[in-house]
């Protein structure tokens, strides 16, 4: 059977087998594998399809989904419908980038290596942190690895995590900690914000890390400066989970004296793609650089004293250090990190601020308009960035279903995550939502 | 040929974006948020025009070697052709523009694709159920080990050790540590295979699992695999297959029939999804019935009566989640398209061509380089540069010289059990002519080590930069641009 992906014809194969010194492929296979394990029948899979057929099959499947281009979406909950400049995908489609391997041979991988170095630099500039790695799988795994880094640095095995951290991040952390028996306790929250008294009761010199998300899962800004002195006073590391877009205007993890800053990088130019691939951002103080998980690109010179880039501090990594590595991560999210690097380069100093301001202004407008409606109130009164929680007399589930039929995805039903919040709808407004769309949402809500 | 940093191209006032004006009544940031929440200084991001930015990244891109340009015989990494159709399909709005928290009714096509991909993978590996959640192979290893821990814990003792062979990938022991286990490494025998006596000696009721790559990292099929499985199971341990080399078995052998309880799949290596210069990957796991309850949540299920698909979170014995959502959906679309393009018979051809190509390369090359484990290989084989080393030329030099000939180098210095290792994997997507050209280059380099070793030792000369000083990079650590430094 011929395939466009397999160049060698039957006659090529015969010639090659002859040079190898066997009569048939079967003979070759039996020289390396016990004959009893060789399967006679082909796999029970659907028959091969031509390019046109595969294309039409998958197009058909894709049409069974309701894509965001067909509706108006206010869904957030950790990943967001932000604007993606056309430049990004055009560059990602360069096969020089997407068909390359991890840059093990630096002399023929300068494109990848320099772009990782630039990505690391851009993340540092955005966060006000000193160093950043080449990316993690996603926000949740970055948060889990940040906690493990803190455990390794402090030699302690308890972490204190905000109860208003993204519930899925909490779950991933619990899974990651189960083997190493790292103990996770939650700081309770009141009115959506971390309860400082509860934190004070739980912080001690046994704590390796305090993990705070700001903007938190509900979109509210936590005053990290309130916690910082006691976290550091107790000898723990301070970890912040941030929203990269928010740092266009918000105080940075660096300014808060955070030790490890992590985030979901999806808002930086990546499509939502039903949950991935995205990328985790991780930036730290420079004192932690030798404990960072994952790849790191560094500048050096070649044998003619010209600037070049290599993967550096590889003795932290699994392929060198094996069971003593700082993490087991190998392949990360290089192409997604490239997308983020291009996004931050295009947006630049002014653009990132503008995007953040648009999100802030538009979400505020939406919230105020919604709260003018009878039966809708703002659940939490403290400042938020682009996402807020509305409490209604109806179940959020009912609103989601009803507006869904009108082509509006009004937000996340919080009953899905917290019992007692069945009447709470979490609404995210990005720079992509127009006033007209927001007004339509308000109007639709008024008629539920 | 070097390219400035994007920061060095920055000029105040230039812009690479265009955003709409605020269309609702403006309030002003300072009015909305208290001052203490605002950053003091702007982020020092570059200011470049759109064209500046495009040219910069385009110029960077051409500094890369990549599979669309030429041969990439990195052993164990499986640099095969990445079908262009799959790139197009993953970008269809009905896949790329789906929010992971949309209701199940709105994403039936995505769930259907995931469900069927799981079924195909189960069939390929002889497993009973699959999770698509792990983000990469190493992530799959960790997920599996945490499942194994939960399984043993449920039976009264989580156990304390995981056994691996000395030829294992570095991710294996690293994952073992992250799962809270201790690694016990066993020596391979003279044929480069599992030493049954060594294995037996190290198996006891504290061993949670034995992790094995098959074919192993020497490219050799573990001929005693059934016996190995029996030994592993005799102490109640689980048998884990590192699926990095599953591409060699497609349709010809089933990990399930070999006795494995869990297998990870690398979507890149086996199902042609692009590597992206270091990700995103996809590290699905297939498991036997007994391990199904421990799979991460959610699983994708089908309601047979209604033909509908849904996500199942009600799994009390699950280890929990290992990813924010359901894994790398965009990568799954590509793997699905690849499997449907080739079908069962085509996947078998993939393995067949990969194995023929590897043996075709190995035979003539063993005349010029040492082949420490001289046996018929599967999809890859490992040479040693020992003969050349005695002439003062190291494997690293040979690798760099290959770059001058326009080829990417093989994987070098791995597996650790071969001194001066050169691990070569041609993959099924290379033609006989390309392989002949590679043989020719390897022959020439072997010649050069005798006649002109300096040219090998000073290689590469034809690449965008010459040999880079890695020691300096680590010693004078510079991992970011900053305004102060430059």
Image: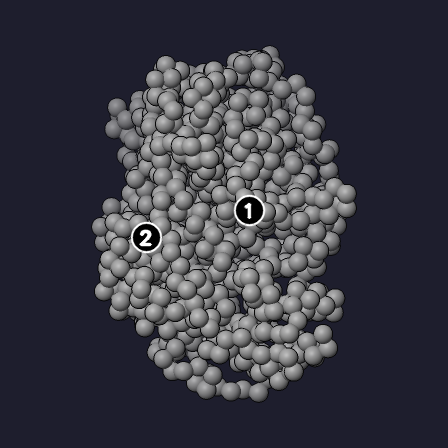
Residue B480: tell me if it is visible: no
A20 left or right, relative to B469 = right
Image x and y of residue A78, in percent: 52, 62
Residue B25: tell me if it is visible: yes
Task: Write down the residue under mark 1.
Answer: B297
Report in which chain the residue with disc 2 lies.
A
Decide which of A86, A184 is in the foreground and name it. A184
Decide which of A148, A249 is in the foreground and name it. A148
Residue at 26% x, 24% y is B390
A393 left or right, relative to A121 = right
Q: Is residue B201 above or below residue B159?
A: above
SS state under label 1: loop
Residue at 32% x, 73% y is A226
Image x and y of residue A161, in percent: 39, 59
Q: In which quadrant of the rendered image does the N terminus of chain B lie?
A: bottom left
Q: In which quadrant of the rendered image does the C terminus of chain B lie?
A: bottom left
Task: Write down the residue under mark 2.
Answer: A158
Report in which chain the residue with disc 1 lies.
B
User: Label 2 vs label 1: CA separation?
Assistant: 25 Å
Residue at 57% x, 83% y is A368
Give the quadrant of residue B186.
Answer: top left
Indicate how the structure is coloured in the image: one colour
Residue at 73% x, 38% y is A49
Q: Is residue B469 above or below residue A170?
A: above
Q: Is residue A29 above or below residue B449?
A: above
């Amino acid at each position: 059977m011929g395939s466009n992906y397999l160049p060698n014809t039957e006659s090529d194969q015969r010639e090659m087998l002859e040079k190898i010194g066997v009569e048939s492929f079967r003979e070759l296979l039996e020289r390396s594998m016990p004959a009893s394990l060789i399967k006679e029948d082909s796999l029970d899979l659907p028959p091969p399809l031509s390019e046109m057929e595969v294309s039409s099959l998958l197009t058909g499947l894709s049409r069974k989904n309701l894509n965001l281009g067909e509706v108006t979406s206010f869904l957030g909950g950790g990943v967001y419908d932000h604007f993606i400049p056309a430049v990004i995908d055009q560059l990602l489609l360069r096969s020089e980038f997407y068909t390359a391997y991890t840059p093990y041979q630096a002399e023929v991988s300068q494109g990848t290596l320099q772009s990782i170095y630039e990505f690391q630099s851009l993340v540092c500039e955005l966060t006000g942190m000193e160093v950043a790695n080449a990316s993690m799988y996603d926000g949740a795994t970055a948060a889990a690895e940040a906690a493990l880094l803190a455990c390794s640095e402090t030699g302690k095995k308890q972490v204190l995590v905000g109860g208003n951290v993204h519930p899925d991040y909490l779950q991933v952390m619990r899974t990651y900690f189960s083997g190493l028996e790292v103990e996770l306790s939650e700081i309770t929250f009141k009115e959506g914000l971390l309860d400082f008294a509860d934190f004070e009761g739980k912080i001690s010199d046994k704590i390796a890390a305090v993990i705070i998300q700001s903007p938190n899962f509900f979109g509210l800004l936590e005053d990290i400066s309130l916690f910082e002195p006691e976290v550091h006073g107790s000898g723990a590391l301070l970890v912040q989970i941030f929203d990269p877009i928010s740092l266009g205007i918000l105080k940075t993890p660096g300014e808060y004296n955070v030790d490890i800053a992590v985030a979901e990088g999806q808002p930086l130019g990546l499509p939502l793609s039903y949950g991935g691939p995205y990328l985790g951002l991780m930036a730290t103080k420079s004192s932690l650089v030798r404990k960072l998980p994952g790849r790191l690109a560094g500048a050096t010179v070649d044998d003619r004293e010209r600037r070049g880039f290599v993967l550096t501090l590889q003795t932290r990594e699994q392929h060198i250090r094996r069971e003593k590595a700082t993490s087991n991560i190998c392949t990360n999210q290089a192409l997604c990190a490239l997308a983020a690097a291009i996004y931050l380069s295009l947006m630049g100093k002014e653009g990132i601020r503008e995007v953040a301001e648009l999100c802030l202004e538009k979400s505020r407008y939406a919230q105020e308009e919604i709260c003018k409606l009878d039966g809708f109130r703002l659940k939490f009164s403290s400042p938020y960035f682009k996402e807020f929680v509305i409490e209604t007399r109806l179940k959020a589930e009912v609103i989601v279903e009803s507006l869904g039929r009108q082509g509006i995805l009004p937000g996340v039903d919080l009953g899905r995550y917290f019992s007692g919040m069945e009447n709470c709808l979490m609404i995210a407004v990005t720079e992509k939502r127009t006033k007209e769309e927001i007004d339509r949402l308000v109007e639709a809500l008024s008629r539920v | 040929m070097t390219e400035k940093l994007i920061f060095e191209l920055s000029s105040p006032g230039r812009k690479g974006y265009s955003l709409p004006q605020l269309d609702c009544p403006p309030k002003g940031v300072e009015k909305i948020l208290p001052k203490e929440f605002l950053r003091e200084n702007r982020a020092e991001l570059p200011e470049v025009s759109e064209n500046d930015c495009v040219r910069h990244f385009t110029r960077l891109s051409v500094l890369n070697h990549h599979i669309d340009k030429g041969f990439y015989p990195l052993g164990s990494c499986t640099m095969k052709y990445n079908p262009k159709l799959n790139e197009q399909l993953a970008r269809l709005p009905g896949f790329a523009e789906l929010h992971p928290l949309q209701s199940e009714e709105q994403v039936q096509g995505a769930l259907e694709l995931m469900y069927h991909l799981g079924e195909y993978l189960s069939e390929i590996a002889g497993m009973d159920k699959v999770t698509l959640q792990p983000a990469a192979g190493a992530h799959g290893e960790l997920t599996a080990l945490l499942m194994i821990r939960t399984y043993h814990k449920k039976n009264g003792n989580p156990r304390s050790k995981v056994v691996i062979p000395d030829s294992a990938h570095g991710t294996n022991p690293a994952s073992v540590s992250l799962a809270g286990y201790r690694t016990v490494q066993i020596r391979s025998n003279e044929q480069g295979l599992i030493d049954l006596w060594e294995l037996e000696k190290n198996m006891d009721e504290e061993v949670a699992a034995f992790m094995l790559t098959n074919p192993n990292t020497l490219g050799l099929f573990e001929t005693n695999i059934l016996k190995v499985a029996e030994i592993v199971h005799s102490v109640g341990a689980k048998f884990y297959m590192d699926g990095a080399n599953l591409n060699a078995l497609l349709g010809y052998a089933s990990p399930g029939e070999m006795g494995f309880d869990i297998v990870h799949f690398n979507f890149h290596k086996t199902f042609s999804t692009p590597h992206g210069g270091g990700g995103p990957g996809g590290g699905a796991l297939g498991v036997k019935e007994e391990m199904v309850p421990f799979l991460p949540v959610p699983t994708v299920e089908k309601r047979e009566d209604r033909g509908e698909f849904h996500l199942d979170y009600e799994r009390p014995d699950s280890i929990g989640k290992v990813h924010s959502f359901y894994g790398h959906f965009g990568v799954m679309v590509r793997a699905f398209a690849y499997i449907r393009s080739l079908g069962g018979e085509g996947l078998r051809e993939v393995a067949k061509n990969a194995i023929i190509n590897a043996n075709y390369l190995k035979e003539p090359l063993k005349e010029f380089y040492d082949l420490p484990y001289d046996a018929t290989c599967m999809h890859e084989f490992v040479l040693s540069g020992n003969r050349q080393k005695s002439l003062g030329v190291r494997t690293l030099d040979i690798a760099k010289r290959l770059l001058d000939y326009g080829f990417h180098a093989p994987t070098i210095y791995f597996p650790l059990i071969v001194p001066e290792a050169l691990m070569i994997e041609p993959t099924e997507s290379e033609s006989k002519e390309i392989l002949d050209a590679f043989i020719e280059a390897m022959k020439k380099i072997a010649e050069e080590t005798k006649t002109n070793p300096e040219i090998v030792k000073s290689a590469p000369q034809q690449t965008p930069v010459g040999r880079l000083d890695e020691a300096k990079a680590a010693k004078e650590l510079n991992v970011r641009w900053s305004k102060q430094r430059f």
